[in-house]
Image (cartoon, rainbow, N blue to C red):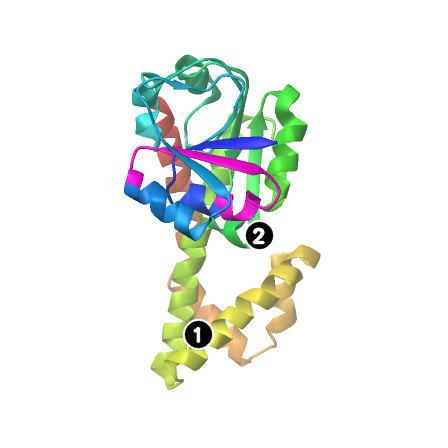
C-alpha cells in the first residue's frame, strides 16, 4: 500500500520513520532542500516538490501541513483522493471535506513517539476507513478509536501534546537531582530509566495505586509528594489539558 505524505515537518518525519518499513512512502512538500534532507535521512522514500496542480486522485493521503495552510493547499491540488488521514490539530472533518475531495476522511492525532514505534494515536472519522486507519497507525504504536471529534480534540491535548508536558517534568526531575548534588549525566540516565519503567506499570495499575504503593507513611516520597501538591502541580496539569483543548477548538474555527 502506498501512502502519500503532504508536508514533511517533525510529525511527518516521525510517522515516516515508523511506517517506511511496511508501506511505500511518497512525500510531497514545498521546500526542496528540506525534502532532500529527509531523503538523505530516510533513503527508501520518494520525494516530490508540490506543484501548482498536484493530482491526488486515488491516493491515500496523510496530511501533515499546518492547520492554517489547508485553504491555501486547496488551490494546489486536484482530483479525488481515496482517503485523507489528517493529523491537523483542531481541523474538523467538515473543513477537510470543504477543502479536499476524497472518498473518506479520517482525523488522527499521533505523537512524536511514532519514530520509535511508541505513539499513542487517537483516530476518528468515516467508519468505512476505520480499519485501514487502525492498521496504518497501529504500525507506529497503540491506537484508540473515538466516536466524536470532541473526544479527539481532548485526546490531542493529552496524548498529542503530552510528550512536551512530560519533557518538562523529566527535565525538572533531573534538575532537582542536580540541584541536590547528583551529576547531570547520572540524573539524565536515572530519569530516562524512571520513564522507561513507569510505562509498563501504568498499563497494569491505576496511577493512584502506583502512588500509594510507593508512598510509605512519613517517608521520602510522602515529603516530595506534599511539595508537589503545595505548589499546585496537579492543578497545573489539569489546566494544561484544558488550555490545549481550547486551543484545538480555536484552530478548528479558523
Q: Quadrant of the N terminus?
A: top right
Q: Position of residue 193 (x, y in %)?
A: 54, 72
Give residue 8's quadrant in the image. top left
Instruction: Tell me the number on the disc at residue 118.
Output: 2
Tell me the tag on residue 144.
none
In this picture, which residue range is highlighted in magenta? Answer: 15-32
Image position of 127 with respect to 4: above or below: above
Q: Residue at x 59, y 64 (%)?
A: 198
Q: Where is residue 180 shown, x and y percent of the image?
A: 38, 83
Q: Can you see residue 239?
A: no
Coordinates of residue 15 in the picture (x, y in percent) = 50, 43
In the picture as drawn, the residue positioned furthest to the right comes out as 204
Which is more toward the observer, 103 or 44? Answer: 44
Q: Kindly tell me whether residue 189 is visible in this rendering.
A: yes
Q: Residues within 10 Å of mark 2 (few under 14, many from 20)?
A: some
Helix, strand, or loop for circle 2? Answer: loop
Q: Is residue 8 above or below residue 167?
A: above
Mark 1 nearby-residue class (10 Å; few <14, some 14–19, many ≥20): some
Q: Residue at x 34, y 80 (%)?
A: 179
Q: Residue 219 placed where, x, y %?
A: 55, 80
| Residue 24 versus residue 140 in the image, above or below | above
Residue 253 drawn in magenta: no
- Image disc number at residue 188: 1
- Name the one closer to the observer, 56 or 241: 56
> Is residue 19 rendered magenta in the image?
yes
The quadrant of the image that shows the C terminus is top left
Amino acid at each position: 500500500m502506498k501512502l502519500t505524505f503532504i508536508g514533511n515537518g517533525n510529525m511527518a518525519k516521525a510517522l515516516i520513520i515508523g511506517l517506511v518499513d511496511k508501506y511505500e512512502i511518497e512525500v510531497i512538500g514545498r521546500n526542496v532542500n528540506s525534502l532532500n534532507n529527509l531523503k538523505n535521512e530516510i533513503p527508501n522514500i520518494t520525494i516530490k516538490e508540490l506543484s501548482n496542480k498536484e493530482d491526488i486522485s486515488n491516493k491515500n493521503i496523510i496530511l501533515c501541513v499546518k492547520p492554517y495552510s489547508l485553504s491555501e493547499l486547496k488551490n494546489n491540488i486536484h482530483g479525488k483522493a481515496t482517503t485523507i488521514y489528517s493529523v491537523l490539530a483542531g481541523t474538523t472533518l467538515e473543513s477537510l471535506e470543504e477543502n479536499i475531495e476524497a472518498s473518506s476522511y479520517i482525523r488522527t492525532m499521533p505523537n512524536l513517539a511514532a519514530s520509535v514505534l511508541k505513539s499513542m494515536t487517537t483516530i476518528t472519522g468515516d467508519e468505512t476507513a476505520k480499519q485501514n486507519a487502525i492498521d496504518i497507525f497501529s504500525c507506529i504504536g497503540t491506537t484508540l478509536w473515538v466516536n466524536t471529534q470532541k473526544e479527539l480534540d481532548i485526546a490531542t491535548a493529552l496524548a498529542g501534546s503530552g510528550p512536551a508536558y512530560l519533557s518538562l517534568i523529566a527535565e525538572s526531575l533531573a534538575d532537582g537531582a542536580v540541584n541536590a548534588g547528583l551529576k547531570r549525566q547520572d540524573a539524565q540516565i536515572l530519569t530516562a530509566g524512571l520513564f522507561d519503567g513507569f510505562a509498563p506499570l501504568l498499563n497494569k495499575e491505576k496511577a493512584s495505586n502506583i502512588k500509594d504503593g510507593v508512598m510509605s507513611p512519613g517517608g521520602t516520597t510522602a515529603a516530595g509528594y506534599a511539595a508537589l501538591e503545595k505548589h499546585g502541580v496537579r492543578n497545573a496539569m489539569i489546566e494544561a489539558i484544558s488550555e490545549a483543548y481550547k486551543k484545538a477548538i480555536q484552530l478548528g474555527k479558523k
